[in-house]
Image (cartoon, helix red, strand yellow):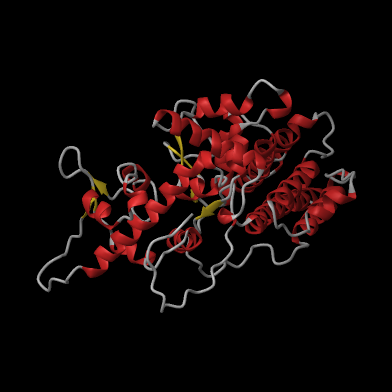
Amino acid sequence: MGAGPPSDSGHQQPELPILPIAARPTGHQVRLLSTIWNAYAQTGRWPTFDYVERTLYGRAPNLSLNAQEVILDCPWIVRPHGLAAYGWVWASNSQHWSLNRDESLGLTVAGMHALPSSPEYRAAHRYVEAFLWALTTIVAAELSADPDPQGVVDVRVRETDLADKMPPHVRADVPMLKDVLDREPPTVRRVRTPEPGTWAVDPELRIRLYNRIDSVDAYLSAVAEDVAPAGAQPTPVAPSALSLPEAIDYLNEVWHRRAGAPLFDIRRADAAAKCALGCASKDEFDSRLSAVGEILAHMRLPGSDRDRLLIDLQQGLPPQLPDEAADRATGAIDDLRLLLSLRTWRQHSGTEPAKRARAAMARVGIQLPTNDWGGAWGRIQAFAVAALNALREEVELIEEIQSFSHNR
């Protein structure tokens, strides 16, 4: 990127964590980023999702890409509660998992940095360098402000202040920094227009977290610490890797006693085995989720077709249970149907699958894509275990009711 902003040579920089967002993009991801950037470079405005989708799909079948899927596969910095906070791409409605055709797509500093280093992207990398110089200047202005014992100090860094601090080779890029700064976490929604034709940044105190940033990797590490600080890991609901297979077996056994046959017709051993495995990547997550879906899709319910298995189960259990137990059984089956919605969405694009997937993610407490696929899979395991155990307990209640009635 060339010479970056000034750094304190006497300050020992800590070793930076390796973040997925700092990784080299795949070929498909490069096509996405370059499509967005080239449209901006040619018109001076960020393109619509419709333009990006149509360009990536193309006319040659072997080159066609689903833009929504490629965006979802890009790495993201994810907040502790599961919502994606920052990635290579921003969308004007901030819902990257379900994009409207008329909304704008743009590249963040991380996205511009991820572009190849070839001459056609030289301006993008120069913008990244200009941003780092601007960030250094804004942080310095905040830190150098004199405290007022009787009031609150407001810091304002004007466009001209930034230009004065810029080296000549990036000074011409200051005007475009207005839109970049307004999208980046340290300065988002802090860009002002004090007079027509000018702009300034009124930083918040939290911008001090970005002190001594002199590289993109250091900046992304600071963003991760800012928007997704590390905290205590919650105790998983599923106490062991075998909890999900055990919950399936336990429900199968109870159902077998009641109906004379197991509920789940597990035809492939690898599907059951995958339910107990860990997860370290997107592909492994999709494989584990498909295994759960395969098991749920092979239930033995006479007279029910594969597309209505959970619906028929949900309609068949409540009449045999007291109201409160019926509500719990219905809720448990609803939760299992949500897992199938997630699986469908990961395999198929479209508005309706995305809508159901958003509801499923909110219920499970995850956001996809994520930079912690293992954590997301752990939440899925725990969620499935809770639903299966609740369903099993209500089936056992049916047994108790029937036994009581028989013994009277």
Asked whether residue 156 is in view, the answer is yes
Residue 44 sits in quarter: top left
Rendered residue at 38%/61% (across/down): 5
Locate residue 66, reporting x and y percent: 63, 31
Residue sitting at 49 percent across and 56 percent down? 79
Find residue 220 and report its horizontal and vertical position in percent.
48, 58
Task: Say above or below: 238 vs 85.
Answer: below
Q: On the rendered structure, is 168 left or right of 56?
A: left
Identified at 82% across, 52% down, the residue is 254
The mark total stands at: 0
Residue 35: name its quadrant. top right
**Residue placed farthest to the top in the image?**
59
Picture coordinates of residue 65 (x, y %)? 65, 31
Is 280 on the left or on the right of 255, as rendered? left
Quadrant of the image occupied by residue 227: bottom left
Up the image or down, 180 lies above or below 240; here it is above
Q: Position of residue 2 (x, y in %)?
A: 47, 56
The answer to whether 236 appears left or right of 245 in the picture is: left
Relative horizontal placement of residue 13, taking residue 75 as reference (left or right) = left
